[in-house]
Image (cartoon, rainbow, N blue to C red):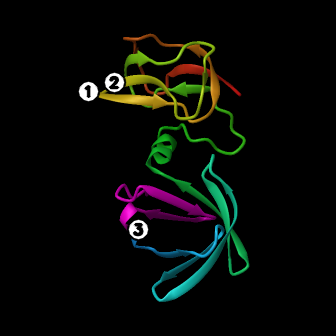
Amino acid sequence: MPDITKPYKVTAGDFIFYFNDEEIAAADLIQKSPTEFNCIKDHCSVNAVLVTTNSTNKKCSIAIDGETFLIEIKDELDQVLDNMGFGLKPGKVLTNIKAPMPGLVLEIAVSDGQAVNAGDKILILEAMKMENSIAIPVNAVIKKILVAKGQAVDRGQVLVELSPL
């Protein structure tokens, strides 16, 4: 179960850790070179080497004592997108954006045929008197907008069809 007081989720293999800004700031971490780090926790010293990094999908691999670990880091937005069903698994292609909740379309920020980048706002959906900005999690082209401003939508209803880049 996610810890909402700790906005960073770090997955290393089968292990999941949650951190907040205070815990990260309090870490006794020393950068020895651009790829080498030392961390001291509970009187134990650990040396780590950054082997690979991919900032686009927030993944990296680190080597500790000759063993390499694949790490994935998700911030609050990434976790919200996952909970809303927008998170992507490797190899999965996103072909549409669905309503995460029932609501009313207040604004449509894109048009058919428009190229959009990950993080761009697609539309604003009002639900329970709150405005929810719906952003796209991947680069794509808007194939077809299936809703209109002022339209009521149901949870899971397809709002926008996409063509992957």
Question: Was residue 110 drawn as part of the magenta stretch in this picture?
Answer: no
Q: Are marks 1 and 2 in contact (CB under 8 Å)?
A: yes
User: In the displayed image of the protein, which residue is found farthest to the left?
Assistant: 129
Q: Classify residue 83 as left or right of residue 162.
A: left
Question: As drawn, is 47 to the left or to the right of 151?
Answer: right
Q: Which of pointers 3 and 2 lies earlier in the amino acid sequence?
A: 3
Q: Position of residue 6 (x, y in %)?
A: 39, 59
Q: Where does the N terminus fall, quadrant-wise?
A: bottom left
Mark 1–mark 2 Cα distance, whole angstroms, equals 6 Å
**Which residue range is magenta in the image?**
1-23
What residue sits right under mark 1 in the picture? 129
In percent of width and height, residue 33 lies at 64, 72
State the CA–CA distance, disc 3 to disc 2: 36 Å
Q: Is residue 37 left or right of residue 127?
A: right
Q: Earlier in the sequence, mark 3 or mark 1?
A: 3
Report the residue at 39% width, 12% height from top: 151
Identify which residue, 66 or 156, lies in the foreground.
Answer: 66
Is residue 54 positioned above or below 29 on the image?
above
Q: Amino acid at mark 2?
A: Glu
Q: Residue at x 60, y 52 (%)?
A: 58
Residue named by callout 2? 126
Q: Secondary structure at mark 3?
A: helix
